[in-house]
Image (spheres, coloured by chain):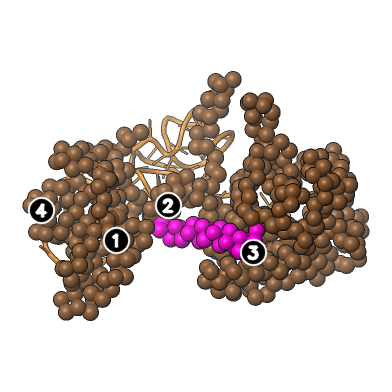
Amino acid sequence: MFSNKFIQQRIEKANVLREAGINPYSNQSQRNTTIEKFLNVNADIEQKEDKRDATRLYVVSGRIKFLRIMGKASFVKIEDESGMLQLYVARDNLAEGFYNTIFKKNIEVGDIIEVHGYPFVTGQGELSLHADDLKILTKAISPLPEKFHGITDKEVRYRKRYLDLIMNTEVRKTFQTRSRVISLTRRFFEDKGFLEVETPMMHPIAGGANAKPFVTHHNALDVDRYLRIAPELYLKRLIVGGFEAVFEINRNFRNEGMDATHNPEFTSIEFYWAYKTYKDLIEITKEYFQYLFEHLKLPTLLPYGDLKVNFNNFQEIPLIESLTLIGGVPSDIVNNKAKIIAYLKENNLDVNEKMNLGQLQGELFDEFVEEKLIDPTFITEYPVEISPLARRSDTNPEITERFELFIAGREIANAFSELNDPLDQLERFEGQMAAKDCGDDEAHEMDSDFVEALSYGMAPTAGQGIGIDRLVMLLTNEHSIRDVLLFPAMKPLNGDICEEASQEEE
RNA sequence: GUCCUGUUAGCUCAGCUGGUAGAGCACGUCACUUUUAAUGAUGUGGCCGAUGGUUCGAAUCCAUCACAGGACACCA
């Protein structure tokens, strides 16, 4: 594994250190400041007459990123989580012999070191640390990638995220933002009185969305379990049970294709709010975005790639109207199955003629409208056929009290007034079963336990799901879901070996 | 799933119409006490993603496979 000659060289250096009585993996750290604090606290050194203060003593630690050895003195740049600091390391300031035999020969880029010293400003005007003691904390036996270009190969960046983080420190910012988004989301809903709950990840029936599940097996019970595709049906059981505002932030798993916006496991928040309707959800969603933008200090005219998304311009439009107003679909065809099929064909699109009217309207939306929705837009009043869990409109039973929120041409959230009529729910599931028989293998499963729960009465409730990964993509101006996941799903590097191994087991 | 492109030194990349492989960085050695991708000198480093084929000869042409990126398809 470590046959590479550069690695061998470095292992040898670690051995030399050991022979000199130096532990190359010491944990005796005495660090007393971060680099960021050091630079902030000592910003005044610049003003001092001799540009130094030898009475201020610090111990800093970090990984060596640059090393410039210039005879009897060296400049070293070390980096910790907070930032980068230049060290000035001169032979005559260190213990006798240390500079020539230990420092110059056995300490190198990639190693993690700890340095004692005081602040001063170099001739070139850089606030630095004047080192008078230095020790190695951790020897890196693998060399770092090239110092200027760093590591750009996306495959390596995703497979070895630690290297990506070492070499491309700006990547950390994306993940810090991600963490902030999740933390702020949690706080936002808690402050509104929502209770955070955890529901099962392994489901006997994969429900709450239309998607293919991952299957696993529980040995003790000898039953198959599905990794959840959505927590929806469990959260609604909690509303039946009497909780009035719950949310869950967690992973969902869908056994489908991978691309720039799909990873097999992804994070969402779902929240359910009793005695509210989807109209209330529109309001809380606007408030939520305002809260995020304030705390993340983002401009409300947010750049996203070539786009500028105006977060002061939330729009609201019913789906059918959006087809004509935004999609340019002639108004006389949008409620006619045969005409929609003809129109899709005219536009050289594949059409499944078994689709019902609602599904076809959904097709029209996906093809002609979705990508044009740049500023945040609530598309409302979805056809009942493609909304098996949403409540029907009181004035038009063909549509539901539902919206999806689109931003920058992408779906960010899905919400509706929940269907709480158990008999209607049963019929919808039966309709989904029929769709399944017609070849829609992603149609919703029948969940009679859930219907039974509804039969005890679920207060009128509104619920919403928000895709956290896509939200973070939007807020960090990233265009691949892999860039907002620390460890995105990757194919195994050596597929053959895996296949052989699994065959041997059988 | 389909199509396109890529895969060459630890990293970033050259390598034209086939003639046994090149740069920069890194690494080794030497010089250098204020550098900023330090500099100068010198040296080491490669089963050219894998397997077949065509050819006197393949990093280069062809086929298959693997992985990646992108586009499309599918998909909340």
Q: Nearer the viewer, mark 2 or mark 1?
A: 1
Question: The disc labelled 4 sits on which kind of residue?
Answer: Ala
Q: Residue at x 15, y 38 (%)?
A: A19
Chain A shade: brown
Residue name at image x 72 percent, y 56 percent = A244
- Where residue B34 appears, as percent x and y from the top left, is 17, 68
Residue A85: quarter of image: bottom left
| Quadrant in the picture for residue A122 | bottom left
Range shown magenta? A168-194
Do tag 2 and tag 4 residues touch (Cβ < 8 Å)? Answer: no
Mark 1 near mark 3, Cβ–Cβ under 8 Å? no
User: Residue A119 lies in magenta, yes or no?
Assistant: no
Residue hosting label 1:
A33
Colour that chain B carries in the picture: orange
* Disc 2 secondary structure class: helix
| Marks 2, 3: nearer the viewer | 3
